[in-house]
Amino acid sequence: MTRLALPLLLLPALALCGADTPTSAQRQLTKDIAGRTAGKPARCVPTANGGEALRVIDNQTLAYRDGRTLWVSRLDAPCPGLAPARTLVTETFGGQYCRGDRFYSLQPGSTMPGPFCLLGEFTPYRRPR
């Protein structure tokens, strides 16, 4: 085996080792959810008026805050190329996000959209009163 072949064999193993390391967006979501109670998932939720837009947590999770409620959408399948640093473009109708609405992401500085993916149901997380 040549010197170059051994490091190339190790690359997939190294990539797998880092796969379980939470990103800063995942750590922030965990912190935001702490102390909140999950409610019944909703098919559609109002878009945040004056609140924050949908933000990418990881390739299968989106979230946004609307007043006192933190809404988390877990996609049915991972969305290729979806990452926290990307811009999210959604196709919504009637002022709400709904399960099955299409979206895609853009890499900063790029005009080439990623693949279309579908929103999942939205789970509300609220602080106890």
Image (cartoon, rainbow, N blue to C red):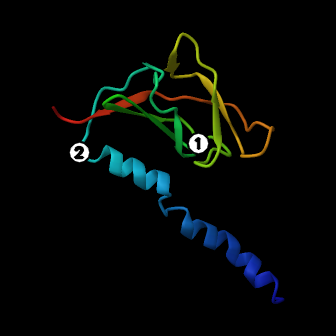
Q: Amino acid at mark 2?
A: Gly
Q: x, y (%) of residue 103? A: 64, 29
Q: Residue 78 got which mark?
A: 1
Instruction: Give the vertical position of 28 relative to 60 (above or below).
Output: below
Q: x, y (%) of residue 94? A: 54, 10
Mark 2 and mark 1 lie on one chain; the one further toward the N terminus is 2
Hey, which quadrant is residue 92 in on the image? top right
Number of the front mark, 2 or 1: 2
Instruction: Give the vertical position of 25 relative to 99 (above or below).
Output: below
Residue placed at 59% from the left, 42% from the top? 78
Near-viewer residue (93 or 50): 50
What residue occupies the far left of the structure in this picture? 129
Q: Residues within 10 Å of mark 1 (few under 14, many from 20)?
A: some
Q: Amino acid at mark 1?
A: Pro
Near-viewer residue (97 or 16): 97
Q: x, y (%) of residue 91? A: 63, 21
Q: Quadrant of the C terminus?
A: top left
Residue placed at 81% from the left, 38% from the top? 112
Q: Secondary structure at mark 1?
A: loop
Q: Marks 2/1: CA distance?
A: 27 Å
Position of 116 with respect to 66 (left or right) is: right
Near-viewer residue (19 or 88): 88
Residue placed at 34% from the left, 46% from the top? 32
Q: Quadrant of the N terminus?
A: bottom right
Position of 85 with respect to 31 (left or right) is: right
Q: Secondary structure at mark 2?
A: loop
Residue placed at 76% from the left, 76% from the top? 8
Q: Residues within 10 Å of mark 2 (few under 14, many from 20)?
A: few
Q: Residue 35 got which mark?
A: 2
Hey, which quadrant is residue 121 in on the image? top left
What residue occupies the far front of the structure in this picture? 50
Instruction: Give the vertical position of 58 relative to 3 (above or below).
Output: above
